[in-house]
Image: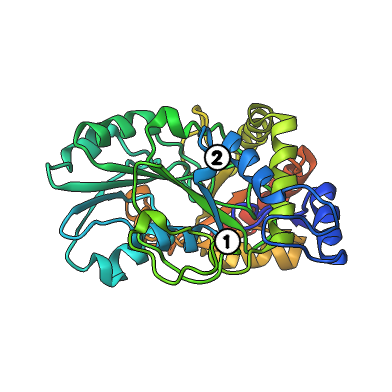
Amino acid sequence: MIYLNNAATTYPKLPCVLEAHAAALANPPQGQFRGSSFGSYDFYGDCQTAMSCILGVKDRERIFFTSGATHSLNALLSGLDLRGKRIVATAAEHNSVLRPLYNLSQLKDSEIVIVPCDRFGKVRPQDVERHMTANTGLVIVNHCSNVTGMVQDMEAIGQVAGKYGALFLADVSQSAGCLPIRGDQWGADALVFTGHKGLFGVQGTGGFYISRQQSLRPFLYGGTGRDSSRLIYKTDAEYEYDAGTQNAPGLIALQVGAHAILKKGVEAVQAREQELVRFLYDGLSQLCGVMVYGQKDVNTGPVVSFNIQGLSPADTAYILQNGYGIVVRAGLHCAPLIHSFIGSRESQGTVRVSLSALNTMQDLECLLSALKEITQQCTMKRI
């Protein structure tokens, strides 16, 4: 099997991640902020430190762990005081952003506006500014599109948000571990990440960063292992955002994955994945009847989307998996709005190839060979 669906979940995992996760499950559990063996280190704090480096933020204590990006986004969007405020999002957003915006009762009095993107999935900072008003409370932007791989100019957009006194929330779920992230430099008030993609962690891990200047209404109440005699919190700022039993084995795996990325160097990971992306773009451009979405000659995330004339995305993915043993993803990719702008709405989405640094040129040669056969068969049928 050739696995090319890493934007959903990376596979295979790094051996060190698998070993750490297995060891955490095999050894006696310890308290909330200790590892899974007696006399162990503070895995929670060490994971915060690693993630602060990945996210480009100095204040590691303002990183909190959840079950993933969806949990984190719901916590932030329901916890920030955005009542009656305008919220500016983009056409490139994932449903983990869009559905909370349109369904959370806490936002029923908020005005949701969507900034368009171009045919490559790029959102221009000046277009964000056109949608800003004095009443804008939040700007939320996906750093890297999970459909086209397009990377947004986060620093420029952060400056726009700051100019109008709005909070800036960066969704780095698709880019953490793949692209450099500079949360402090961007002026981000909050960042959201997941563990099971570019950080090579396991499903059910992720978290968020929230600036110390921001107060967040708690999303969950419960035990934290500290100050257990207290039942009532007088202010939101007093509450801790990590209530309940943490996923210690998952966080240990996340910590090990993050350290492995940092040891390799995010820039080195990015360079390797860009090499693969450009090779794939070049190969797809030589196939008849293939439409590629996105922009080749810019740095993007490790995602390439395409369609084959005469085949639905679902049919293409089915043929690749069942005829050639190649796993890709088909459809809207939980990002429904972007397809109206890149031209894939009528086809019900795209075929998405998403890479990790563990993929090889041979993987892509096999994919291109399979696609050449498929497109030739489609051409013969049209004749």
Cα–Cα span, label 1 and label 2: 19 Å
Q: Are marks 1 and 2 in contact (CB under 8 Å)?
A: no
Q: In the image, what residue type sits under mark 2?
A: Arg
Give the total number of marks visible in the rendering.
2
Look at mark 1 in the image and give the residue it sits on: 226
Colour setup of the view: rainbow
- Residue lying furthest left: 134
Q: Secondary structure at mark 1?
A: loop
Give the image location of residue 367, x and y in percent.
71, 49
Visible residue check, residue 239: yes
Q: Indicate the position of residue 289 as horizontal and vertical percent values.
A: 53, 49
Q: Quadrant of the N terminus?
A: bottom right
Q: Amino acid at mark 1?
A: Arg
The residue lying at 22 percent from left, 48 percent from top is 137
Which callout, 1 or 2, points at the residue further toward the start of the chain?
Answer: 2
Kindly state the secondary structure of the residue where label 2 is placed. helix
Q: Is residue 153 visible?
A: no
- Which residue occupies the foreground of this view, 267 or 38? 38
The residue closer to the viewer here, 307 or 309, is: 307
